[in-house]
Amino acid sequence: MVAATEQDVHDLAAAMPHVTVVRGPSGNPVYQVGGKSFVFFRTPRPDAVDGTTGERLTDVIVLWVPGEEDKRALVQDPGTPFFTTPHFDGHPSVLVRASRLGELDRAELAEIVQDAWLSQASARRAARWLADQEQAQQRE
């Protein structure tokens, strides 16, 4: 297992096609495709706090998911680093702390970032990327 890192999130998101990086009000990176965010590094908010200290979490990353079912699959197991807060009820995204990314394999993180991109990319871009991936697998 190659443990995932925060840098992997940046590298994987930036490697997807047609990606732009914009900066949030605090300079936090927001990865977008076609003007739609799919990964962003969140600033500390009152809804995401440390369960022990009550301090706001400073390392939360938001990743879009294809839908509610995908979200439930990621957050229902308390052993995974993924979570959500009431603020994100009904929103197709999951949260993960950068400090817990090492609990994931880099390949698993890659799949989650790719799914995030696919959930926000236009149908044409998504279809093209999926076709390219299929062709690459056939060559292997």
Image (cartoon, rainbow, N blue to C red):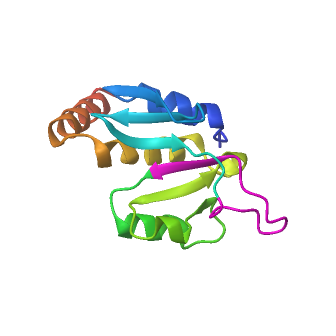
Left or right of 101 on screen, residue 23:
left
Eyeballing the image, is 1 above or below 54?
A: above
Residue 60 within the segment the image draws in magenta: yes
Residue 96 in the image: state x and y as whole percent: 60, 54
Q: Nearer the viewer, residue 58 or 83?
A: 58
Farthest front residue?
A: 25
Relative placement, left or right, of 103 versus 123 is: right
Residue 129 lies, with reference to residue 53, above or below; the image says: above
Camera-nearest residue between 25 and 112: 25
Total numbered circles: 0
Relative to 68, does residue 66 appear above or below in the rendering? above
Residue 133 located left or right of residue 112: left
Q: Residue furthest right?
A: 53
Which residue is at a point 39% across and 47% down the rendered structure image?
Answer: 116
Instruction: Return the x and y of residue 75 as percentages of the image width and height.
Output: 54, 68
The spot of residue 100 in percent (x, y) is 70, 51
Q: Position of residue 87 (x, y in %)?
A: 51, 66
Report if residue 88 is visible in the image.
Answer: yes
Along the line of sight, the residue nearer the viewer: 83 or 57:
57
Q: Which residues are magenta?
A: 46-63
Is residue 114 in sight in this rendering?
Answer: no
Locate the N terminus by quadrant.
top right
What secondary structure predominates along the stretch shown in magenta? loop
Quarter containing the C terminus: top left
* Residue under the point 71% across and 54% down: 57
Q: Is 54 inside the magenta-drawn segment?
A: yes
Residue 5, picture quadrant:
top right
The answer to whether 55 is drawn above or below residue 44 in the figure is below
